Image (tube, grey):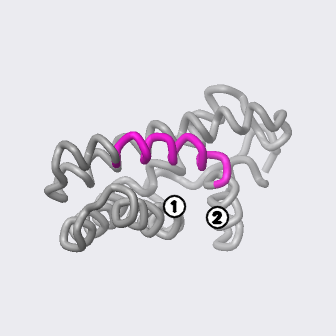
Amino acid sequence: MKPNNPTYESVGSLKAYWVDTTARIIWYVPTLGLWEKFFVGMDNSEIFISRTAAIAWNLGIGRLHGKTREWLSILTGITSQSPNYQKLILDTLTGFIVTFTSYAASLSVSGASLEEAKVALPFALIFGLVTGRPYGRFLDWYRKKWHITPVLDT
């Protein structure tokens, strides 16, 4: 594998699917559940539905985060040798794209009120932006543990 031209697992790789999916579930599901409980004021049944929906949603789109990072890396030419600010941009953009779509869907099925959604959604977007790089580092570490090609090999 050349550092500037990694060979990623195919979109249909079952192992890569499970690695990317479980990484998102481990990272995002509990954290956003805590936010919903302590800052948004959602009740336990809403949180249960929201987090269950988030797990289900991530089962469908969990691989999307990993593949989006790969595609954006290839598109922009950002590699493990790129400056840290470029890695930050790549992971922030990926976090924004994927978090916005996944969290909005989770909220919509949870029964959260419009007032709750007005508090929860901006946080999720900010969370996706702020934790984009830390999550990217976690995902690369987690991928390496399971022998899946990391994007930025951190």
Q: Position of residue 41 (x, y in %)?
A: 29, 60
Decide: is 82 above or below 48: above
Q: Classify residue 146 as left or right of residue 94.
A: right
Residue drawn 59% across the image and 38% down it: 92
Label 1: which residue? 20
Q: Position of residue 145 (x, y in %)?
A: 69, 72
Which class describes the residues within 10 Å of circle 2: few (<14), some (14-19), or many (20+)?
Answer: many
Q: Classify residue 39 as left or right of residue 115.
A: right
Which class describes the residues within 10 Å of circle 1: few (<14), some (14-19), or many (20+)?
Answer: many
Q: Amino acid at mark 1?
A: Asp
Q: Amino acid at mark 2?
A: Arg
Q: Classify residue 5 as left or right of residue 46.
A: right
Q: Earlier in the sequence, mark 1 or mark 2?
A: 1
Q: Secondary structure at mark 2?
A: helix
Label 2: which residue? 143
Residue drawn 51% across the image and 47% down it: 127
Q: Quadrant of the C terminus?
A: bottom right
Q: Are marks 1 and 2 in contact (CB under 8 Å)?
A: yes
Give the dominant element type of the magenta stretch: helix, strand or loop.
Answer: helix
Which quadrant of the view contains residue 150? bottom right
Residue drawn 85% across the image and 39% down it: 81
Q: Position of residue 100 (x, y in %)?
A: 38, 41
Q: What's drawn in magenta, residue-wise?
A: 120-134
Q: Position of residue 5 (x, y in %)?
A: 74, 39
